[in-house]
Image (cartoon, rainbow, N blue to C red):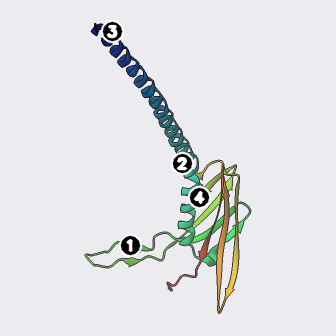
Amino acid sequence: MYDCTSDINYSSTLSLLEILIAFVIMGILGISAMKSITSLRQQDTSLQKFLVKHTSLFETQLFINKYLALSKPDTIQIFHNKIQWEGYNNLFHNAQKNQNYMDFSLQTDTFSLELHNGNLYLNQSLLLENVHLFDTQIQMFQTSNTTTSILEYNLCADTCVQDFVILEESEIQL
């Protein structure tokens, strides 16, 4: 005679074994997914730390380039840990009296970048903290019939940035 109860017990035991294997596989997949998520969070955190730590240095670099690009090259004076120049404070004014064009402004101000007590100042206002080096020099290059001046600078805080600005004589004549 055939006993049905032994087949039922065996098949239910097999399905419990299958469920146990499925849980183990899901656990392994879950652990690997958690490790991936943790790794991505660590990368995101390290990227944020890098940006917070270095962003102010790169913003300062862009700021310096902007101001030096509006300088009058013949007024640049380089001292130890300091550079001073005359620069255009605002080249254009908004249109006046319902006119459609903007007015030129050739007014200049004196600007200075100075490294003092480990901080970089623009016109005595703090620009960047914990600066180890601020060094500038002007290089002259002769091409054909023109002389090109390039102002090079090194700026070191926690990392160093070396950049340059091409100094062109103003095409605007008074």
Against 20, is 132 above or below? below
Amino acid type for the residue under numbered disc 3: Ser
Lower position in the chain sequence, tag 3 or tag 4? 3
Q: Secondary structure at mark 3?
A: helix
Image: 148 above or below 13 = below
| Residue drawn at point x = 54 percent, y = 62 percent | 62
Q: How many callouts does the rendering have?
A: 4
From the image, tell me which residue sits under label 3. 6
- The residue that label 1 is drawn on is 93
Task: Write the residue at 28% across / 9% down.
Answer: 2
Q: Earlier in the sequence, mark 1 or mark 2?
A: 2
Residue with the mark numbered 4: 122
Q: Residues within 10 Å of mark 2 (few under 14, many from 20)?
A: few
Position of 156 relative to 140 (above/below)? above
Most extreme residue toward the front is 1
Mark 3 or mark 2: name the one nearer the start of the chain.
3
- Would you say the residues marked 3 and 2 are in contact, meaning their CB atoms lie under 8 Å apart? no
Residue type beneath disc 4: Leu
Label 2 sits on what residue type? Leu
Q: Is residue 116 left or right of residue 30?
A: right
Residue 35 vertical position relative to residue 63 in the rendered view, above or below: above
Q: Quadrant of the N terminus?
A: top left
- Residues marked 3 and 1 touching at CB (< 8 Å): no
Mark 1 lies on a secondary structure that is strand
Q: Foreground mark, 3 or 4?
A: 3
Q: Nearer the viewer, residue 55 or 16?
A: 16
User: In the image, which is nearer the foreground, mark 3 or mark 2?
Assistant: 3
| Label ID, residue 51 | 2
The furthest residue to the left: 98
